[in-house]
Structures are given as C-alpha cells and as structure tokens.
Amino acid sequence: MQSVLFSAAGNEVAKVSYTARRLVELGYGTTRPLGLRKEGGPPRPGDLVLGRVTEIGQHRFLGQVHGKRNRLFVGDTVVVSYGARYAPDQFEAEVPDDLGPCDLVAGGGIAGRVVSSHSRMKTPTRLEPLGLVTDEHGDVINLARLARPVVPVLAPRPRTIAVLGTSMNAGKTTVAAALIRGLSLAGHRVGAAKVTGTGAPGDPTLMADAGASRVIDFTDLGFPSTYRLPMPQVIRVLRSAITDLTSHQADAIVLEVADGILQRETAALMRTPEFRAGVDSIVFAAGDSVSAVAGVRQLREEGLPVIALSGVLTASPLAMAEAVTGVDIPVYEAAALADPSVAGRVLAGAVGAVGAVGGTGVAGVAGVAADGHGAGTGAEDAARLTQHGGPAHEHGRLVEYGSPLTAETVA
C-alpha cells in the first residue's frame, strides 16, 4: 500500500491515491513532513486534501500507482485531489466551494461534489475533509507544484497517432494499447500519453503493460482532470506530453484523447493549430456503426487525418459489416492493430484509400492489398465479415486474430 504519515494529524497514516502519487515520489510524508490547513479560502482544482471515508458508495476501491487498487473502508484516511469530472457513464462533478463533506467522484482520487450521474450509478462514496495538505512551510500543496519537469528538446517530433472516440467506453484505451503493442513488436520505442480525462491508473498502466517505453498523463503535468480547464492549459498538456516523450527518445507516439469528440475540451482541442501540427494521423474508436459513420464524417469535415476505425463496435461482426458500408477508411479489430505490420502501416499513414463503389453507397477498398492480392468490393468484404464471425477487415482482406486486449480501469 502506498501511504504517507501526517504529523499534524496525530501521526496518522493515510492511503495515497493515484492523483497524489508524486507526494511519495518526492519524499513527502517520510523525509519531508506533511501538515494540514483547516481554515482559509475555498479549495482550488489540484489542491490535495486529507479526507476520512464516512460512507462507501459507488467507489469501493482507491486507485493507486501502477494500477494497484486498495479496498476502502469506513474510517480510512486518504489523500486525494480536488477536481472536476466529466463522465457520461458515471458522474459529472465540480470542485466544492468549501471544505465541507464531499464525494469521491473518481476512484483514481478525485474529490468533488456530484452534479449529475448516470442512472445506474450508486450514491458516491462520501468523504469528510480533515484539511488541505501542506508542506513543511505550511503552504498548501497543489498538483501543479508536483508536476514532472519537462525538458525542452531540439530533436524532431516522432510520428504521432492520436486515438479519439465517440464517447466514454468506446474502446479508446484498448485501441491505444493494441497500437502500442504492435509498434513495440515492430521494434519501435513507443511513448504514450493520455492528454485529457480524469486521473486514474488503469489506462496508463495498460499502456505500459502493452510495451510503451514511457507513459505520461495530465496528472504528471499538474492537473487532476482536464474538465473545465481553459484551452491554453489543455494545449500546454498536449505540447508538454509530446515534448516529454520526444526528450525520452521515443520514435513513435500514441496519444489518447478522452471521452468523445463532442465533449467540450476534446472538441476544442482537436480544432486547435497545435493539435493539427502535433498529430500525423487519427484512429477513431466507436461503440456502434451509426456513431462510427457520423464521427468519421465529422472528423473529415474538420479536415482531420482520420485513417482507421476500431473500438467496441468490432466486437460485433454485424456492426463491423454496417460500418464498412458507411466509412471510407479501413475497419480494424483491436487485436489486428497489435500486429506489427498493421501497426506499422497505421504509423506511416499507409493504410490504403477507400471510396464508394458503383454509386451503391457501399464502401470498397481501392488499390492492391499489401500481400499483392486485389482488393474486394465493400459488399464482398461485408459479406465475408459476417460469414467469418468477425475477423478484422483490413485492405479488403480478412485476417484471423485473437481476442482484443482489454482495459481494467479504475474509474
């Protein structure tokens, strides 16, 4: 268990959440004393707080570093960060304006007050703040103070793939991990980053497990979440992540952008010059065929380089067949993206051109597949998809792959 000692709280040992992990890395609570401030102004996003668990609700575990999940009990003391949350499948939450009772709104360690929730959510786990966490000088510790230093680098940016999606739980992290796996097996030194979202250990841990040589996310850069962040700060996260991974000698970068392309920060970020200059290609993850077609169309209308489709929809052969008829890019199962040759072509942006056939509205792959065989029509591909029970559709040919990677995230 990752924990720290609070001398100002009666030598109390507290469990440290994923978002507050840098406390331990920098020696706070061991070689550097920690204290508490119980008075003062309202908390700010990123302020660390010592809280006592008073009621167990939706979140029964506290996410810690390296994907560790620590079971919570009433009476536990925890170090978490104040922050907002945007999660259509779970909670929307805001930073409270006082140090009164609040909610654990994300298992990675976010304290806030729930504004709205999905109908299937239980009531949130409740926290009683004991005080804001302070350093040896009595100053409140904010995540911004704990941010990892980013070293400027003169090296050229590696080719960069961004994974965007239709929504939360569309399969973005699974797709990103599959790409990382495939590129790593192809001999690349892959840097990975989650540049927006809510702090949680599951996604970065899966990226590391897939073979990324270095993984960084917005919590490393001083933010508990990116919901409601001003766009200049979101852009700073993007730039800093790419710079950090480049300085650590990555020769390929995979970025995950959280939530869906209609979410406020995601929608704004993908329209910025910095995103367009920093991303070479986009793999789009969708939960169903209709959202896949609509999402790819929107990205194309925005002039963004979306070159492949994947995500949860590929669990269904019928959904894949529907998507093939409505998009002008290849559709891959996640497991196909873990193949070194496929991942390499995605990195190079050389996945082939796709266009409508014969005015029927059915998409077909134009050109010759990498193995030298002619590409089939979209109708033929869709039929073969259905007949073969869901293998990957790539360049008009079908290749058998195993089950896709899965992510076990602490949300």
Image (cartoon, grey):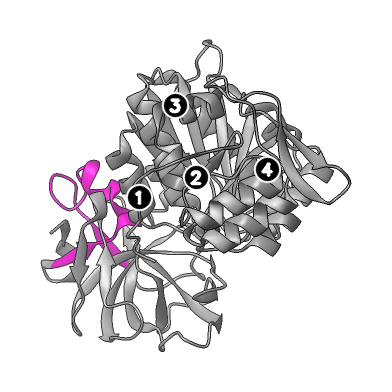
Residue carrying label 2: 392
Q: Quadrant location of residue 356?
A: top right
Q: Quadrant location of residue 35?
A: bottom left
Residue carrying label 3: 245
Give the residue type that dot 4 points to. Pro
Q: Considering depth in this image, is 361 or 303 the residue closer to the camera?
A: 361
Q: Nearer the viewer, mark 2 or mark 1?
A: 2
Identify the residue at horizontal 51%, vertical 25% (top origin). Answer: 243
Disc marking residue 405: 1
Q: Dot 2: what SS?
A: strand
Give the residue type that dot 3 points to. Leu
Give the residue type that dot 2 points to. Ala
Identify the residue at horizontal 50%, vertical 19% (top origin). Answer: 152
Give the residue type that dot 1 points to. Leu
How dense is the environment of label 2, judged by Cα within 10 Å: few (below 14), some, or many (20 and up)? Answer: many
Q: Nearer the viewer, mark 4 or mark 2?
A: 2
- The disc, 4 or 2, on the residue closer to the chain's N-terminal end is 4
Q: Nearer the viewer, mark 1 or mark 3?
A: 1
Q: Considering depth in this image, is 64 or 374 the residue closer to the camera?
A: 374
Residue carrying label 4: 232
